[in-house]
Image (cartoon, rainbow, N blue to C red):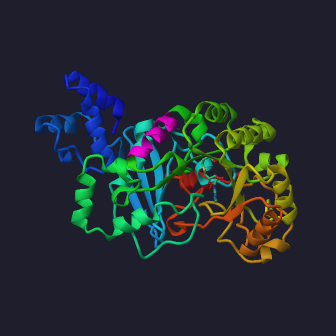
Amino acid sequence: MDLTLLETSLRERGEPAYRSGQVWEWTARGAESYEAMTNLPRALREELTAAVPFSTLEVEVERESKDGTVKTLFRTADGHPVEAVLMRYRDGRRSLCLSSQSGCPLTCTFCATGAMAFGRNLTASEILDQALHFRRRTEVDVTSGSRGDAAGAGAEGTVLDARARKRTGRQRRQASAEPGSARREPSPAGGPTHAVFMGMGEPMLNLDEVLAAARRLPEIGITHRRTTISTVGWIPGLKRFVREVDEPIRLALSLHAADGALRSQLMPVNDRYPLTEVLALCHEHAERTNRRVFVEYVMLAGVNDAPEQARALAHLLGRDHFKVNLIPYNPIAGSAGGEAAGARQEDRPPKAAGGGHFDGSSRDRIGAFKAVLDRAHVPATVRLTRGRDIEAACGQLAAAPKSRKRAAVPTP
Ligand code: SAH
């Protein structure tokens, strides 16, 4: 819902100031339409239905993975594709992966979004509407899930979620109709519990809208501590985030290589903003917030997955301020790499990075990499891949089918 348009429309109608709050509260609690907002005059509900579209996004396609992951392709009112993912875990966590832009202007060589055309920044309302879409979808899949740590977050919410699961449909509806229930329960009636800005786009290029959206997520049931903003290390935005944001929102840095030359090949943005400066800001954030910065490290066979590269990473990061998430590479459409293959990859000579064709590291290779970090006392986890069968996994968000064709264009 375009909250600015909502405000203007209510003001023009001479409605009292509290109206927009009422509408938002219903929406945040998962109402399906204005019609459900029973404390609004009926005529106003009808007027709003006509004047302010209930969502700024239209669902174009939705796919559900066999592991319970749901990927939704939306369109903005002006036709830009936006993708978001809901991951559901057996421990009750439901983690949203949100997009901050349609497409991405950065060109990380292993990322599907980087290969598609950049559209534009999303507004705060368009970001929130991704979350609200999943907030309205309250059922919990209790048969799938895992011990995974896709959002890098803990298992908070288990008790509440178990309680929510036990409720009958009627109780659920009653609970979500209780005024203020969104505030009392962190994950009311099975809504999302965590959010990561790890979908399409670079959040630090659109920081104001991302923050405006993130600041409202608690009302949907996602606290700041369970919200993570991920960046390539775009310094202007990162600096503001570190120095100006007081909310305890988690920071994640997509690093992928400790070595500057290799990082530049994988992520051209590295030439623009020196890693030392980026890491200095991350240290500052960890010290200010007393929370570790997550480091995203996509495991690419023969490129960045050697034990000596793990040692260099440990040396670069130190023990105190970071936690490393090792991400199995997810093959993207148009890339030559198949599923993470076996040991044979390790026998090959290191391939030139930057060509856009990668293989995922084998499990053993990832395990050995992690062991080096463990020995160096740098906290590290191997992230579970979810939703790969529906191309909903990390880095696979590129609206089909136009972008696929672009992604398949040979790189120089
Ligand atoms: N631009 C921000 C937000 C996008 S996050 C950032 O880069 O941090 C997307 C995360 O998924 C990043 O850590 C990115 O490196 C990772 N990723 C991209 N493509 C991937 C792929 N094919 N397999 C696994 N992870 C990928």
Which residue is located at x 31 percent, y 49 percent? 29
Q: Is residue 399 left or right of residue 11?
A: right
User: Who is closer to the viewer here, 105 or 216?
Assistant: 216
Q: Position of residue 256 (x, y in %)?
A: 74, 53
Q: Position of residue 388 (x, y in %)?
A: 55, 67
Q: Is residue 1 above or below residue 116?
A: above
**Observer able to see residue 336:** no
Residue stretch rendered in magenta on the structure = 209-219
User: Who is closer to the viewer here, 238 or 302?
Assistant: 238
Which residue is located at x 47 percent, y 71 percent? 90
Q: Position of residue 193 (x, y in %)?
A: 45, 56
Magenta portion: prevailing SS class:
helix
Q: Is residue 313 left or right of residue 119?
A: right
Which residue is located at x 61 percent, y 56 percent? 408
Q: Any magenta on residue 212? A: yes
User: Who is closer to the viewer here, 123 or 63?
Assistant: 123
User: Who is closer to the viewer here, 148 or 290?
Assistant: 290
